[in-house]
Image (cartoon, grey):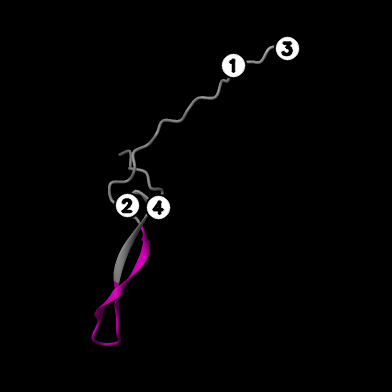
Amino acid sequence: MAPRKASTTSKAAKSKPCPDCATGQVSESFQVGGRHKRESSDRQEALCLTCFGTGHAPTD
C-alpha cells in the first residue's frame, strides 16, 4: 500500500462573536392596538442588524 499523504486542509480562523447578539437573533418588544398603541409584554425574535443574522462580528 502507498503511504498516506499529509492533510493539506487549512483551518479557518475563528471569527469573533457578534457583540450585540452572539447568535444572529435578538428579542424585541412590539406594539399592539388600533389607535392607542401600547407595548406588549411579549417578545419577538428579530434579525440582528449588526451582523445580519450570521452571529459573527463585522470585519469593518
Upstream in sequence: badge 3 or badge 4: 3
Q: Nearer the viewer, residue 28 or 34?
A: 28
Rendered image: mark on residue 6: 1
What residue type is disc 1 on?
Ala
- Tag nearer the camera, 2 or 4: 2
Does dot 3 land on a helix, a strand or a loop? loop
The residue that label 4 is drawn on is: 53
The residue that label 2 is drawn on is: 21
The total number of labels drawn is: 4
Q: Is residue 38 magenta?
A: yes
Image spot of residue 45 (x, y percent):
37, 64
Give me the residue at 26% from left, 87% from top. Answer: 35
- The quadrant holding residue 47 is bottom left
Upstream in sequence: badge 2 or badge 3: 3
What residue type is disc 4 on?
Gly
Image spot of residue 4 (x, y percent):
66, 15
Give me the residue at 32% from left, 46% from top. Answer: 18
Q: What is the spatial separation of the Cα atoms under label 2 and label 3, in whole angstroms?
A: 49 Å
Q: What is the spatial separation of the Cα atoms under label 2 and label 4, in whole angstroms?
A: 9 Å
Upstream in sequence: badge 1 or badge 2: 1
What residue type is disc 3 on?
Ala
What residue type is disc 2 on?
Cys
Give me the residue at 58% from left, 20% from top. Answer: 7
Q: Is residue 8 magenta?
A: no
Q: What is the spatial separation of the Cα atoms under label 1 and label 3, in whole angstroms?
A: 12 Å
Q: Are marks 1 and 3 in contact (CB under 8 Å)?
A: no
Q: What is the spatial separation of the Cα atoms under label 1 and label 2, in whole angstroms?
A: 39 Å
Give the magenta-colored segment's residue range: 30-47
Q: What is the spatial separation of the Cα atoms under label 3 and label 4, in whole angstroms?
A: 46 Å
Q: Nearer the viewer, residue 14 or 49?
A: 14
The residue that label 3 is drawn on is: 2
